Amino acid sequence: MHTRAINNNYHVAGQLKARDMPEVAKAGFAAVICMRPDGEGFFQPKYAEIEVAAQEAGIACYYVPVGGGHQPITQASKLKQILKETEGPVLAFCASGGRCVSLYQLALQAG
């Protein structure tokens, strides 16, 4: 698992799988956020699988898909709320981490 710190509390990564959740928890993340819509790519795990594994690992898990019919500005407000309510570092992921960075920038500006 390769992560990139945007700041002390927000990190991004490319696609994660259910088997990665124990490592995410061990790394000290309080929550994981999936920003990749289900069915976007071949061999992509469904969010529900990741959510169960995250819960089993003792970390919160959120689904904030970006792409398809999901409006980024709406999702930015959701991300802002999650970050406000979460104590500890958060790891957001999508296919490459790029959407996670872009949505974070929008969240900083969201009302």
Image (cartoon, helix red, strand yellow):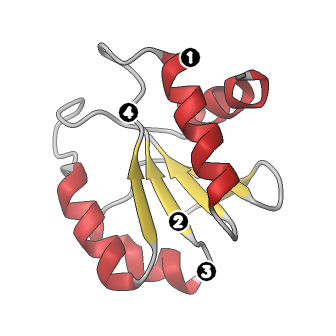
Image quadrant where residue 54 sits? bottom left
Identify the disc placed on residue 65: 4
Q: Residue furthest right?
A: 7
Residue drawn at x 18%, y 49% as measured from the top left = 46
Vertical arrangement, residue 49 with respect to residue 99, above or below: below
Image quadrant where residue 28 sits? bottom right
Q: CA distance from mark 3 to mark 1?
A: 30 Å
Q: Dot 1 lies on which element?
A: helix
Q: Dot 2 lies on which element?
A: strand
Q: CA distance from mark 4 to mark 1?
A: 12 Å
Q: Nearer the viewer, residue 34 or 86?
A: 86
Vertical arrangement, residue 110 with respect to residue 8, above or below: above
Report x, y in % for residue 108: 77, 30
Q: Is 83 positioned to the left or the right of 31 in the image?
A: right
Q: Are marks 2 and 1 in contact (CB under 8 Å)?
A: no
| Residue annotated with mark 2 | 31
Which quadrant of the rendered structure holds the C terminus? top right
Q: Amino acid at mark 2?
A: Ala
Residue drawn at x 24%, y 51% as measured from the top left = 47
Q: Is 32 positioned to the left or the right of 86 in the image?
A: left
Q: Dot 3 lies on which element?
A: loop
| Residue annotated with mark 3 | 27
Q: How many residues crowd mark 3 within 10 Å: few (<14), some (14–19), many (20+)?
A: few
Q: Earlier in the sequence, mark 3 or mark 4?
A: 3
Q: Earlier in the sequence, mark 2 or mark 4?
A: 2
